[in-house]
Image (tube, coloured by chain):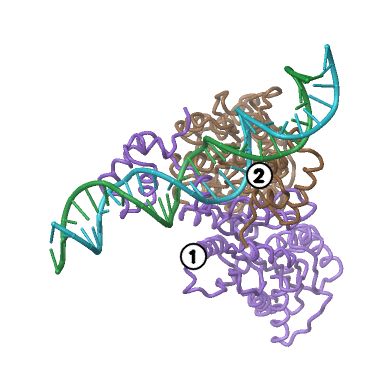
Chain colours: A brown, B purple, C cyan, D green
Amino acid sequence: MKKPTIKDVAKAAGVSAAAVSYALNGRTDKVSGETMERIMEVIESINYIPDFSARSLAKNQSKLIGIVIPQTESHKQLILENPFYSEIISGIEGKLREHGYHLLLSGVNQGESYLDLSVQRNLDGAILMGIYPEPFYDGFKKINIPIVLIDSYINDSYFKRIGIDDEYGGYLATRHLINQGHSNIGLITGAIRKDGVVEKRFLGYKRAMREANLFYNPDYVFEESMSYEHGLAAGKLIADKYPEITAIFATSDLVAFGTMRSLMSEGKRVPEDISVIGFDDISMSKMFIPPLTTIRQSITEKGAIAADSLIQMIQGRTELDEKEILLPLEVVERGTVKFKS
Amino acid sequence: MKKPTIKDVAKAAGVSAAAVSYALNGRTDKVSGETMERIMEVIESINYIPDFSARSLAKNQSKLIGIVIPQTESHKQLILENPFYSEIISGIEGKLREHGYHLLLSGVNQGESYLDLSVQRNLDGAILMGIYPEPFYDGFKKINIPIVLIDSYINDSYFKRIGIDDEYGGYLATRHLINQGHSNIGLITGAIRKDGVVEKRFLGYKRAMREANLFYNPDYVFEESMSYEHGLAAGKLIADKYPEITAIFATSDLVAFGTMRSLMSEGKRVPEDISVIGFDDISMSKMFIPPLTTIRQSITEKGAIAADSLIQMIQGRTELDEKEILLPLEVVERGTVKFKS
DNA sequence: ATAGTCTAGTTAAACGTATAACTAACGAGG
DNA sequence: CCTCGTTAGTTATACGTTTAACTAGACTAT
C-alpha cells in the first residue's frame, strides 16, 4: 500500500525513470508520442501522483506561495477576524489555485520567523499585507524571492505594490461629507504611522477640509487603532464631548461599526443626527443596519491581482510591469450619510 | 550567496553532516554537549536554516497540515467571506504555529483534487469543514493520514470529530423564543441534508415546539441556503405573507442579518414587532445594530481544539481519545429577542 | 589482560524527482 | 561507404536531509 513512485511507473511502462520524468514535464523532444501515451496510461492506472517535496528539492521551486498577515502581540491568533483580510485571502487563493500554486498561510510574530519559513519551505514567492519594521523587508530581499506588497508604501523597486490611492480615498470620503453640508467632521482612525495607509487617508481628510475652506480641528481626530473597539470608544467620546460634530469619517468599516454603535447607545441617531462614512466596503457593510455608506475598493479583486502579479514575477515576465498597481475607488452611498439640514 | 546546507555547517564545525543532523534533532546520545554547542554556534553564525523539502523527503513527514473548506460551484473563491470559516481558521493557525506545523489552505472544487494535494504535499494531517460526498472521505482513509472533521456527522471511527450538539442548539434557540412567549416561530435555514448540521438544528426546533405543545407548521420553515441572501428573501416573504409569525430562528448569524434587513425594509421593527435569534455568534454579531441575540459557540476555540486533536493524532497519542468532542453552547441574550406582549 | 559496554561520533544508503551527458539506431547527404 | 544529425531514449549524478549500521577509543568489570 505504499504510494507509487516514478520508478513504479517506469517499470510498468517498460522505460527508465528519466523517461517518465520527461513525459511528466511534457518534453516531447525526449519521448515519442507513443511512449508518452503508454506512460500516461500507467500513471492513470496505478494512480501515481508526483511528490512535491522531491520535486521541490530537485528543481528548487516549490509551487508554494506564502502569505503573511500582521499579528498583534496580544493576539495569538490570526487577525482573520477582520473580514478585510479574509476577503483578500479569498481572492488570492482562488487565483493561485487556478495557476497550480498552493497557499501557505501564516501569521508572523517576531518578524524574523517568517523569513525562516520562506527559506524552509522554499517559497516561490510571498504576499505581504500590513506594515512591518524595516529589517523585515530587507530579509526578503536577501533571500531573493519575488514579493508583492498589499497596501504598503514601502517605496523600493524590489517590491511590487498593489494598493489604492489612500490619500484620494480619504479625500473622497471627506468631500462626500462636505458635499452633504457638513463642516464639523470627526476623523476616527488607526495609529498614524509614517507611510501607512492611515496617514494617507488622514492627509486626504485634511486636503478636503482645506479645499473647502473648513477649519481643521485636531481635537476632532481620534487616533488609536483600526478596531471596532476604538470606534466604540471614540463614538462615545464624540457623543459626550463634541455635540457639534455632525459627521464622522471612520477609516475602516469596522471602526465605523463601533462608532455607530456607541453613538446610538448614547441616543444619537445615524444618519439623522450624525452621519458616518466608512472605508473598504467589506462584505458585511451592505448587511449592516443601516447599511453603511463607505469608500468601496474591490477587496477580493485586490487579492486576485496581487496573486496574478506575483505569478508573473515568478515566471519572469517583468516586461509590462509597472511597480505599482492602484485599484479604483468610489463612494458607495447607502444609509449612513444624510444631508445636513 | 547560495543558501547554506547542512554540509556547510559540518565543514565549518569540523564534523560530519550526520553529526549536524543529530544535533539539530537534539539527539544527545549522538553528540556531546561540547560538539553540540560548537555546531549551534556555526549554525547561528552562517545563518543556516534547514530545508523542509529535503527533510520531508527523508522523514516522510512534512509538518504541513491541510485545511479544506467547501466551495460552491458558482464561486471560484474561498467562502472565506463567511466569517465563520475565517474565525475557525484563525483558531487553527494559531495552534498549529505554536506546535511547529504550517498551514496549507485550499478550497476544493471537484472533490478529487484535494486528495491529490494531500499526497503531493505529504500532508501530515488535514482538517475538513463542511460536508462532502461520501467518496471524498474514503479517499482520505486510503491515503491514511489523520483527519479531523469539523461540524460533520460522518460517523466513522477513522475520523475524529469536533463539533457542537446541533440538535440541542436548535432546541435552545427555539425554546428561548418560546420562553419569551412566542408560538408562531419561523425557521430560516440552509439546505437540509441528511446528517448535516442544518438537519440537526431543525430537529431541535421541532423538539422544542413539540415539548411546548406548539403546532409545528411546515409553512414556517424556509429552507434554502446559509447565506445572507436567503435571509433577505425569507424575511421579505415572512413580512409579506406570514404576519402572524412573531419570532424567527435563523440557523446562522449571516442568515439572521439578511432576515432582519428585509424585515426592517418591510416596515417591521426588530425586536418590537418580531424577534430574531441567530446561531454561531460570529464576531460581527455583537457589533450589529441591534446586537444579535444568538446561540454562542466558541468559534476560534473550535479551530484551536481541532488543531490540537489533529496534532495529537499525528503524534500517535490516541490513548485519551474520544472520537468526538462537543463544545458547549449557550444562548447569549442581546437585542433582537423580546418578550411577546 | 581480556572481553564487554559506552560514548561520540562517521560512512553510506535512502527518500523521489530532475536533468546534463551520454548513446544506440536510423536516415540523409555527399 | 562514411560522416553527420536527429530521435528517443538511458545512465548517472545531484538536490539536502535522515538514519541504520558501523567503528575507534575510553572506560569497566572480572
Whole-angstrom CA distance, mark 2 to mark 1, is 38 Å
Can residue A289 be seen from the camera position used here? no
Position of B134 relative to A55 (above/below): below
Q: Are marks 2 and 1 on the same chain?
A: no
The number of discs equals 2
Question: In this view of the protein, which residue sits in the foreground, A93 or C1?
Answer: C1
Q: What residue is shown with label 2?
A: A17
Q: Quadrant of residue B326?
A: bottom right
Can residue B334 be seen from the camera position used here? yes
The chain letter for the residue carrying disc 2 is A
The chain letter for the residue carrying disc 1 is B
Position of A35 relative to B271 (above/below): above
Give the residue drawn at x 78%, y 51%. Answer: A41
Question: In this view of the protein, which residue sits in the foreground, B288 or B7?
Answer: B7
Secondary structure of the residue carrying tag 1 is: helix
Give the residue drawn at x 71%, y 56%. Answer: A47
Give the residue drawn at x 74%, y 42%. Answer: A333
Where is residue A128? Give x, y as percent: 57, 38
Secondary structure of the residue carrying tag 2 is: helix
Where is residue A185? Give x, y as percent: 60, 37
* Local crowd size for mark 1, using a 10 Å CA cut-off: few (<14), some (14–19), many (≥20): some
Q: Quadrant of residue B5?
A: top left
Q: Amino acid at mark 2?
A: Ala
Q: What residue is shown with label 1?
A: B312
Give the residue drawn at x 28%, y 44%. Answer: B35
Question: In this view of the protein, which residue sits in the foreground, B291 or A218?
Answer: B291
Where is residue A9? Give x, y as percent: 69, 50
Where is residue B13? Give x, y as percent: 32, 37
Q: Amino acid at mark 1?
A: Gln
Q: Quadrant of residue A186?
A: top right
